[in-house]
């Protein structure tokens, strides 16, 4: 009898040390929802400050997904009717929680800021899960889709790999995680808010190349007319898509609930059926269904099992040598002033390279615009002052045309002519911008010189008859007399240089726009841009003041 008691005691002790059997995600989700509903029913809980977001969803009987409205097959809107894979995923999640979805429009640039501002509860908007974004949001795992970025362009254009896009402009959307990789291969970016405009920009040849998720372009390649003209050149950056919530403590239980729902929906084929209903590719979801049916994954801890979940795409950029000091400075500013300072252009090698080139190119552009303005002013002023009708009237016609044309149109025409004569390059774009800015401002300054010349001739005729001052000296005096107008248009040329980014000139505005397309800190970045141009214009004003004083001194001496 004693022996049996000992054996029973040993067996009980052995079972006691065995790990408890893992719960299924279904059981864990039911407990989580039940607890949150119970909390929401407690008097005063729904009006508490910093309320738990899962509890708030049950208090308000709604969840606020951020979705896209201009992304075929995944998120579109016609009137009040929304459709697409992401839309149906959000509806299915809301139904599982027993609440109503209240949709908010987002795009690649606004989805994370709207989440941070608590204007949405969850992002369901074709967002790739990469290591850069891990610090900004809390991604839901397992992932609900996967894609890669693809470069699309005309069939006649020979582009096969990265070396072929160097020096070319690629149309992308702001906030696309692959923008940094495109920039790192020496391509320029033309930025758009919505992916839905890219096919139209390709068709009307505004864009030669465009980059976006392959899942997005799959919809357009169904159209025979689009498929006849364009093709996928190459793909890169295979990335899983994830729903995401705010990286705050009061979002933890909502994130946990969405993790469990995603496991269940993958295992039971809910995501798969939604994809089929929306004509979305299902290969990834079929593989994931097999994964989440496995016993080691089909548990309440499956989303933390590396054998079950997919890793985030490694999108970390090479840091600069002084990145650590920059981040320390940002933290010090926040601790001291409470201001969220972000200096992305100083923290990664691609951004730093763009920033340096942008500063140098901007200074070249300003100097070139000043010289071109002065030269065109002297040439057009001399021609309009000529006694020859054959020289005077064409110069006046050119001046009137330039004065009547919008600056942007003059830039576009100058760029089109330059690109017809020379292969596209950054130098060609900068050169075209210098010529356009010089012509626009030089024509106005030249008119001022011509008017001063006519005044001086009239004065000479009344005082000295037909003899008098030689033409060269008279022209010199006319330039001196119109010093104020010349200086004004020189300053105007310097202030107008940022508009050169419109034609792809890689000056500082263009560089910073590229940087903010794959990094945060837009407010700080553009504040620095303002400071840069204020300093540049102040220096130009000082130099022009010296020039004006010299010209006026000559006028007085004459």
Image: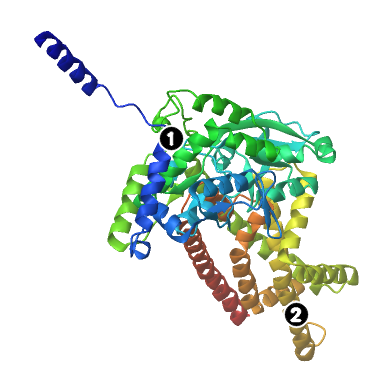
**Residue 6, how many percent across, how many down?**
12, 13
Residue at position x 32%, y 58% in the image:
333
* 13 on left or right of 29: left
Q: Is 40 on the left or on the right of 416, as rendered?
A: left
Q: Residues within 10 Å of mark 2 (few under 14, many from 20)?
A: some
Classify the position of the C terminus by image quarter. bottom right
Q: Residue at x 79, y 33 (%)?
A: 155
Q: Nearer the viewer, residue 329 or 150?
A: 150
The residue that mark 2 highlights is 451
- The residue sitting at the left extreme is 2
Can the viewer see residue 529?
yes
Q: Position of residue 314 (x, y in %)?
A: 47, 33
Q: Residue furthest right?
A: 390
Mark number, residue 25: 1
The picture quadrant where one finds residue 208 is: top right
Q: Position of residue 367 (x, y in %)?
A: 59, 58
Q: Is 328 or 460 nearer to us in this picture?
A: 328
Q: Name the quarter where the N terminus is drawn.
A: top left
User: Between 418 and 397, which is closer to the camera in this rendering?
Assistant: 418
- Say whether disc 2 or disc 1 marks the residue closer to the N-terminus: 1
Mark 1: which secondary structure?
A: helix
């Amino acid at each position: 009898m004693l022996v049996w008691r000992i054996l029973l005691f040993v067996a009980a002790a052995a079972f006691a040390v065995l790990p408890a059997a893992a719960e299924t995600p279904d059981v864990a989700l039911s407990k989580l929802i039940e607890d949150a509903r119970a909390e929401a029913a407690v008097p005063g809980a729904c009006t508490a400050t910093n309320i738990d977001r899962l509890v708030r969803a049950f208090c308000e009987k709604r969840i606020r997904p951020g979705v896209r409205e201009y992304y075929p097959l995944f998120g579109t809107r016609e009137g009040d009717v929304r459709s697409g894979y992401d839309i149906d995923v959000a509806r299915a999640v809301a139904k599982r929680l027993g609440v109503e979805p209240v949709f908010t429009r987002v795009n690649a640039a606004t989805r994370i800021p709207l989440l941070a501002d608590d204007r949405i509860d969850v992002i369901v908007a074709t967002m790739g899960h990469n290591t850069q974004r891990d610090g900004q949001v809390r991604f839901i795992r397992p992932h609900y889709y996967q894609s890669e970025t693809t470069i699309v362009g005309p069939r006649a254009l020979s582009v096969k790999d990265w070396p072929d896009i160097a020096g070319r402009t690629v149309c992308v959307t702001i906030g696309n995680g692959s923008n940094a990789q495109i920039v790192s291969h020496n391509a320029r970016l033309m930025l758009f808010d919505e992916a839905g405009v890219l096919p139209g920009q390709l068709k009307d040849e505004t864009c030669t190349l465009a980059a976006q998720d392959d899942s997005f372009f799959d919809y357009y390649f169904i159209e025979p007319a689009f498929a006849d003209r364009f093709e996928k050149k190459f793909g890169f950056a295979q990335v899983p898509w994830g729903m995401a919530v705010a990286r705050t403590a009061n979002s933890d239980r909502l994130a946990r609930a969405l993790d469990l729902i995603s496991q269940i929906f993958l295992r039971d084929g809910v995501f798969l059926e939604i994809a089929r209903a929306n004509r979305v590719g299902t290969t990834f979801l079929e593989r994931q269904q097999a994964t989440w049916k496995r016993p080691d994954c089909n548990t309440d801890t499956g989303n933390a099992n590396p054998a079950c979940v997919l890793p985030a795409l490694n999108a970390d950029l090479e840091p600069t040598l002084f990145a650590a000091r920059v981040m320390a400075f940002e933290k010090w500013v926040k601790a001291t002033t409470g201001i969220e300072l972000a200096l992305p252009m100083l923290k990664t090698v691609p951004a730093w390279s763009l920033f340096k080139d942008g500063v140098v190119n901007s200074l070249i552009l300003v100097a070139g615009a000043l010289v071109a303005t002065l030269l065109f002013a002297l040439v057009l002023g001399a021609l309009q002052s000529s006694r020859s009708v054959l020289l005077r009237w064409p110069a006046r016609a050119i001046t009137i045309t330039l004065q009547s044309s919008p600056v942007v149109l003059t830039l576009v025409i100058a760029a089109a002519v330059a690109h017809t004569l020379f292969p596209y390059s950054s130098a060609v774009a900068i050169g075209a911008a210098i010529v356009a800015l010089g012509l626009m401002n030089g024509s106005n300054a030249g008119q001022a010189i011509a008017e001063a010349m006519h005044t001086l001739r009239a004065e000479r005729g009344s005082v000295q008859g037909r003899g008098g001052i030689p033409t060269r000296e008279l022209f010199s005096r006319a330039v001196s007399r119109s010093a104020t107008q010349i200086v004004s248009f020189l300053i105007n040329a310097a202030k107008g240089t940022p508009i050169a980014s419109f034609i792809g000139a890689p000056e500082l505005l263009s560089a910073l726009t590229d940087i903010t397309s794959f990094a945060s800190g837009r407010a700080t970045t553009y504040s620095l841009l303002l400071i840069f141009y204020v300093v540049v214009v102040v220096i130009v004003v000082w130099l022009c003041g010296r020039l004006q004083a010299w010209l006026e001194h000559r006028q007085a001496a004459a």
